[in-house]
Amino acid sequence: MIVEIKAELYTTIMILSLRVVFLHNFLKKGAKNLERHVLSVLVRNSSGVLTRVSGLFARRGFNIDSLTVGRTEKEEISRMTIVLMGNDDVLEQFIKQLNKLEDVLRVHELVSEHSIYRELVLIKVKASPEKRGAINEVVKIFRSKIIDVAHNTVTIELTGDDSKINALIELMEDYGIVEIVRTGIAALERGDKDITNYGEYFN
């Protein structure tokens, strides 16, 4: 009886181990195929619309990197800019699920080659009197600015794309970063077209 239990337990452990290995390899393989997709989403300014959209992320397990929202040129409409990490299948499912929501008027992917991406970051950095000169030089090179000075820290503001912001953060790590706040991406399509060209609601 004990031998049978041990054998059954051993088999169970082996099955679980194989499942863990399979899942690890699956996720590792899938991670290589992850791409960043930037979506511009127009929604009605109705009560709870942000809750319904964010609830969609939680229920479906989508990998959202950032979400920004604000009013557009029309008071009754807001624009969400959502950065989604995933392959083309994930993107397709995400757009389908968004379009099912009643308050969503239009979903449009903003491809990097034809769009403008910008983000704002605030970085509070340790700044002793001996190091402030060097920090100021870096700030000038990045065309950023110092917006607050305290006894032991300075706060830097920078607007730019991901690569510029990440480069500044990496350099500031040498001085000691106290806090970072990033707004998430704001994006628009280049040229004369705008998102209203793609929706019947606006025609």
Image (cartoon, rainbow, N blue to C red):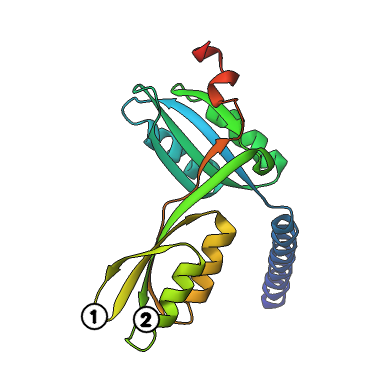
Question: Is 11 situated above or below 84?
Answer: below
Quarter where residue 113 is shown: top right
Residue type pointed to by label 2: Arg
Q: Mark yes or no: residue 67 visible.
A: yes
Helix or strand or loop: what does disc 2 sit on? Answer: helix
Asked whether residue 61 is in view, the answer is: no
Q: Which mark is residue 151?
A: 1
Name which residue type carries label 1: His
Residue 195 in the image: state x and y as whole percent: 55, 26
Front residue of this view, candidates 144 and 89: 144
Q: Residue furthest left?
A: 151
Discs 2/1, front = 2
Quadrant containing the N terminus in the rendered view: bottom right
Q: Residues within 10 Å of mark 1 (few under 14, many from 20)?
A: few
Q: Is residue 96 above or below residue 176?
A: above
Residue 132: assigned label: 2
Task: Name which residue lies at 75% across and 59% down.
Answer: 29
Tell me the residue at 72%/77% (across/down).
Answer: 3
